[in-house]
Image (tube, rainbow, N blue to C red):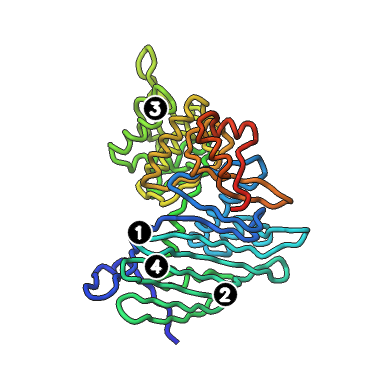
Amino acid sequence: MAEAQEFSDEDVQETVDDGPSLPPLWDIPRIVGIELTNFLSYKKAHLELSDFTAIVGPNASGKSNAVKAFRLLRDIPTYGLPVALARHGGFDQLRHRSNGKPNDPAIRLNFVFEGAPPSFYEISLGSVSGKRYRVKRERAMVNYGERGESVSFDSDGSRLSASERLAGPADDLRSAIAPGQSALSTGSFASYVVQNTLRSIQTIEINPALVGALQDPSSTDEFDPAGGNTTSVFEALTHEERTRVTEHLSAVVPGIVRIEPQNFADKQTLAFYQHSPSGNRKFLAKQMSDGTLRAFAIMLAMTQKTRPQLIVIEEPEVAIHLGALQSLVEILKSASSATQVLITTHSADIIDEVPVDSLRVVWSDQDQSQLAVVSEHTRSVLRTGMITPGALLRADALDPDRVA
């Protein structure tokens, strides 16, 4: 029985002239969608993603639960499956309950490398007595390159089978998996690519209090989803990148002319310089409004050196002035050409700035969350230009395609 192999970027530096190319470990694929089965409030749902996607729907309809699926996927390679589940309240809390009966959850992420057929990763969990869990099935198919190259793995929770067609005939690998663990830790080439893909998803949950507080210096240039390392991340940017963040923030918060890191003994924070009739006034981060700190953190997350493939932001409009929302959405749409953006929102003003093809509607039906694109009838009404998506949202008339 062959041992699963560990791979690093150095292993694939040389290209193969006559055979298939090697998996692009340094490339991150485009995320095309996620499928949820018996996950939290969803019995069955499919969310397709574009460059910029907005999920809308009433309170408690399931918007946050869709975001939690992306967060769980990111957490699996980051913390390992047992800790990832614990961070989300445990396996039992993730199960969809229909008529009082809990059902076993599954998530499938669909992604694609440029010029290649679709790829996917999926994991399905089952229950064990005592509200514990087991991995029922975990598998992935990664397609890449222009010659039909692919790597894959399939696991029943205890045994892994991996097929790796790299630069010649397919190599079949076998490996044992500890109970309750993910196959992503086995070291197959497919698992390595999937890990990189899942880590390229970032969910933003900004806490203005953390952004405004004195912070410990950090050596990482990856944005902390809560905003606890904004000073270090901003400090790591180039002058041009800092200028871009400042200009974007000034479009949302007029008068911001400069942002600078400030050190206080072993702590650090940011100073914001704002134009006033008497000259530029300096304010430390803790003196800025929650809306300004949230807007700044969003701009910073979109500019960080470690750029995610997909950034997920819940309700970016919170604490931000209505008059600034159009500018905020335009900035997010512009950034989505390099980093996919998914937002959830209640704001009719934001919806008016989002193309109708990028809208996804969530609603609750018989204790199940449903998710779909906007109905063709509603699209026809919007094409007349006599009403906007935001106006339909205010009237609770932004109808989903219930057949999708």
Circle nearer the viewer, 2 or 4: 4
Q: Is residue 244 left or right of residue 347?
A: left
Outermost residue on the bottom side: it is 1
Q: Residues within 10 Å of mark 3 (few under 14, many from 20)?
A: many
User: Which sits in the foreground, 156 or 354?
Assistant: 354
Q: Helix, strand, or loop for circle 4?
A: strand
The label number, if any, that marks residue 114 in the structure image: 1
**Residue 61 visible (yes or no):** yes
Calculate the distance from the C-alpha at mark 4 to the C-alpha at mark 1: 10 Å
The location of residue 269, given as percent across then percent down, is 42, 35
Q: How far is mark 1 from mark 3, CA to CA?
A: 35 Å
Tell me which numbered mark, 1 or 2, is placed earlier along the sequence: 1
Label 1 crowd (10 A; few <14 / some 14-19 / many >=20): some
Residue labelled with disc 2: 157
Secondary structure at badge 2 equals: loop
Asked if the residues shown at circle 2 and circle 4 are in contact, with their CB atoms under 8 angstroms apart, the answer is no
Q: Mark 3 falls on what kind of element?
A: helix
Query: Where is mark 3, residue-wise?
Result: 250
Looking at the rendering, which quadrant does residue 26 occupy? bottom left
Q: Quadrant of residue 398?
A: top right
Separation of marks 3 and 4 at Cα, in angstroms? 43 Å
Q: Is residue 351 above or below residue 178?
A: above
